[in-house]
Image (cartoon, rainbow, N blue to C red):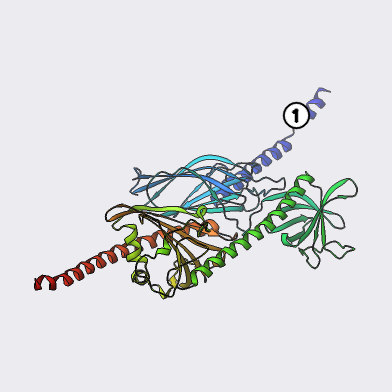
Amino acid sequence: METMSLDFLLPSLWEIKVTVAASIYVIFAYWFFTYRGSRDGYCDRSLAGNSGESGDAIEEKDGMLKADAHNNSPYLIKVELLAAKNLIGANLNGTSDPYAIITCGTEKRFSSMVPGSRNPMWGEEFNFSVDELPVQINVTIYDWDIIWKSAVLGSVTVPVESEGQTGALWYTLNSPSGQLAEHSYSCALERSFLYHGRMYVSAWHICFHSNVFSKQMKVLIPVGDIDEIRRTQHAFINPAVTIILRMGAGGHGVPPLGSPDGRVRYKFASFWNRNHAFRALQRARKNYHEMLEAEKKEKAESALRAHSSSIRGSKSQAMIPEDIIPNTGKHQAFIKDEALNSIYNDAFPCTAENYFNLLLSDNSNFTNEYRSARKDTNLVIGQWHPADEYDGQVREITFRGLCNSPMCPPDTAMTEWQHAVLSPDKETLVFETVQQAHDVPFGSYFEIHCRWKLETNAENSCIIDIKVGAHFKKWCPMQSKIKSSAINEYKKEVEVMLEVARSYIKSSTSAGETDKATTSSPSQESS
């Protein structure tokens, strides 16, 4: 009896061998998918990664120290990855396992992985040694997966222009698909039976994807085609949402359900919280129509600016016209203040009044010299004239400018609308410009707004404050990259403009003194 008990309780030699072999296999599999996978750039919780975007934004803190004690690189850039928020839920339960990969030149750093979160908190610091500035830091956020390749949730590029410490900033991430999924829900599409999958809601589309028994089900519904969203029931006990499209419209992908009134409809059920999803869909539809109204308003403002600036005055004006001095009436803003970022603030050897007289007036040749220095062609300059809609005076210039972006053609047609206002005491000049590129990707989606403010502080000196930014008339992919590129390009443009302006003012002043001496010499001889 005791022998039988021992045989029953103690494992046999064969059972011990199987257990040891299984343990070795599990350890090897864990090592293979974890350490080797991370080395290939897919994922690893022990490494540090960074990248950005799928849902909203990433908070980052940049700092730079001069000289690196461990190598010969003159600069050491310290990047602190703090957090991300509103990332896309890539898992079936609506969460993600985000980690980030941060790249600077040829160097790459990995963050840790935060399991089951759409709002990860890292608080990790990474160092990069660089030889020169400026440099670009790319942050890409991935969703960690133990079997499949990690999915990109989004990315953002942060430029580092010069030395100095910056505070914590939120950066909006670029979505790899071109659209940001604002919400995602676990639900099921009603067909012959319920196909469980996931619904994604963006500003323009409502998408659904399901993979049940290797059968792919995809639905793409334009928000603009939605006529009605209803609360309904599936099988009397399962809360559902039915999306009904307007007459003549249809979604893409899986054929829709039939309807007695001829309108296309899709029914989704098995939500974890049907009412929450219903409110989000209603809100997406409302925001879509508000966005269309905002786009119409932007188009009207742009058309008004172009119309007011393109009317040329009938007379050439050498000095500052009286119409440039503002009156007490209410006028529209020429540019968008919220889009501007300060890029320059320094003294300039000229008063605000003389700046307009010498560089911006109709008889000035400065614009021609500046555009020639930039190698721009086909320059056409309109004349300053008053506009009822704006204070001061406006004019329009057109030219073909060079493009440095690899996504753009070698040169592009440009239209620039200019607006100038001089204070009553002629001590302050506000010079605003709006640039529209015509031959570049998404050129009709955005404008470059700039404001020069000159305040006279001495007899022959003033302080110039320059702000610039990209104003988007409607959303488009790569917004953050377009904004950063626009600011960087305009910084270079300002350097050339100020250099040509100083040279032009110096030559004009010298010519004026020579003319004055020439005209005064005959009177001296006659006396």
Seen in the image, is 497 located left or right of residue 151? left
Residue nearest the observer in this picture, 213 or 391:
391
Q: Position of residue 286 (x, y in %)?
A: 71, 54
Res 253 → quadrant:
bottom right
Q: Residues within 10 Å of mark 1 (few under 14, many from 20)?
A: few
Q: Position of residue 205 (x, y in %)?
A: 70, 59
Q: Is residue 107 above or below residue 295?
A: above
Does residue 361 appear anywhere in the picture?
Answer: yes
The residue that appears at 48% across and 72% down in the rendered structure is 412
Residue nearest the observer in this picture, 470 or 186:
470
Seen in the image, is 276 located left or right of residue 332? right
Does residue 160 appear anywhere in the picture?
Answer: no
Residue nearest the observer in this picture, 492 or 191:
492
The residue that appears at 41% across and 43% down in the rendered structure is 165
Seen in the image, is 414 located left or right of residue 6? left
Q: Residue furthest top?
A: 2
Q: Quadrant of the C terminus?
A: bottom left
Q: Quadrant of the N terminus?
A: top right
Q: Is residue 80 above or below residue 9?
A: below
Numbered-mark total: 1
The local secondary structure at tag 1 comes to loop
Res 352 → quadrant:
bottom left
Q: Position of residue 181 (x, y in %)?
A: 66, 53
Q: Is residue 20 above or below residue 268?
A: above
**Residue labelled with disc 1:** 10
What amino acid is at disc 1? Leu
Q: Residue furthest front?
A: 527
Residue nearest the observer in this picture, 186 or 439:
439
Q: Position of residue 282 (x, y in %)?
A: 75, 52
